Image (cartoon, rainbow, N blue to C red):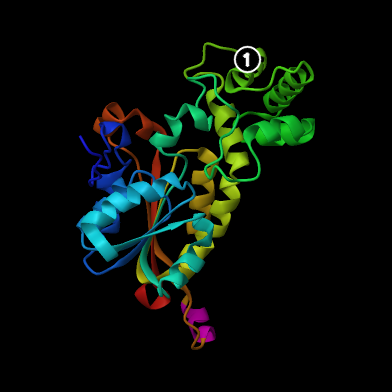
Amino acid sequence: MGNSISAEGAMDGPQHEPVLLRELLEAAAPREGERWIDGTFGFGGHAAALLERGARVLAMDRDPEAEQRAALLQEAWGEQLCFVQGNFAEMELAASGIGWGAVDGVLLDLGISSGQLDDPSRGFSFRWDAPLDMRMNPTGPVTAGDLLQELGEEDLAKLFALVARPGESRRLARAVLRARERGRLQTTRDFVAAIGAARPSGRRIHPATRPFMALRMAVNDELGSLEKALPASLRLLSSGGRLAVISFHSEEDRRVKQFLREHLLRRPAAASRAEEGSQLEEGFVRRARFLPSNEERLRNPRSRSARLRVGWKGTREDL
């Protein structure tokens, strides 16, 4: 059976179901003729749903393998879908490259795709004894192994602070240094062993799950990319445009929440209206958060930690 991509996002299996798809479509309501940027194409489930609603989609992904999957979708949708390999932090350049000065929607599904997680050679999972790689773009300059070999205790502690309290992050950093000194930090299994020495078992999730996530986020500068992409999205969105971000980590979600709050337009007091002059301020006139349903959590375990935040762009005139 050949591979296929549909709105359900499946390529030879349900494991690639796009997270929070129903909530995204109901809240953001993509319409025929709109221009959308899907900054994290992955397996194409969200992009396919946008296309089925009649939108034109500029899809981006750091992973060159995503281009092959996008080609399958282009067979059905032709020029309605354009794929650009790259970091969504560069979405303005990508949009300009195809002649888009403004868009109606931006979607960012943060984290990694199921395909990346399920490929042992990429080193994103500790289910296998794999190389310490974790690069979303395999041609990137720095691997997870590089960071673990080069960073000192302070920087390692800062890295793990994303997923642990200060005392614990320091213990994790020291455990990595001990493993490094003994030459036992070459593969994912070595990293799990080092973490296990500093983090007790018996937790609800595997002790290495969150340190693995923190290391992956550092390798790919995921928070830095998000910090660049959020203001770029606001600049690109036309009035009435929607920014939709799906996050799986509390720090990512916190930054998205803070960005939407900082750029939320509020009705000015009567005394200050005269001082506004003719300048028309732009920002978000509304924002909302959505969680996966119980049914989705049971059907798709990856969705359990997911959060969708949507902001609707407008001007003060819309208030």
Residue 200 in the figure: left or right of residue 269:
right
**Residue 144 found in image quarter:** top right
| Residue interval drawn in magenta | 270-276
Residue 228 in the figure: left or right of residue 183:
left
Q: Where's residue 305, x and y in %?
A: 42, 34
**Residue 28 found in image quarter:** bottom left
Residue 139 in the figure: left or right of residue 309:
right
Please identify the dominant SS of the magenta region.
helix
In the displayed structure, 175 sits above or below 4; it is above
Q: Is residue 81 visible?
A: yes
Q: Quadrant of the N terminus?
A: top left
Count of number-bearing discs: 1
Report helix, strand or loop for mark 1.
helix
In depth, the one of 189 and 305 nearer the eye is: 189
Q: Residue at x 28, y 45 (%)?
A: 21
In the displayed structure, 74 sits above or below 177; it is below
In depth, the one of 131 and 213 nearer the eye is: 131
Q: Where's residue 113, x and y in %?
A: 41, 39
Q: Quadrant of the C terminus?
A: bottom left
- Residue at the bottom extreme? 278
Q: Where's residue 216, x and y in %?
A: 57, 36
- Residue at the front extreme? 1
In depth, the one of 274 and 170 nearer the eye is: 170
Amino acid of disc 1: Ala
Q: Residue at x 51, y 59 (%)?
A: 230
Q: Where's residue 263, x and y in %?
A: 50, 64
In the displayed structure, 107 sits above or below 199; it is below
In the displayed structure, 146 sits above or below 106; it is above
Look at the image and say whether residue 271 sits in the magenta stretch. yes
Q: Residue tagged by mark 1?
A: 193
Look at the image and say whether residue 250 sits in the magenta stretch. no
Q: Residue at x 28, y 68 (%)?
A: 34
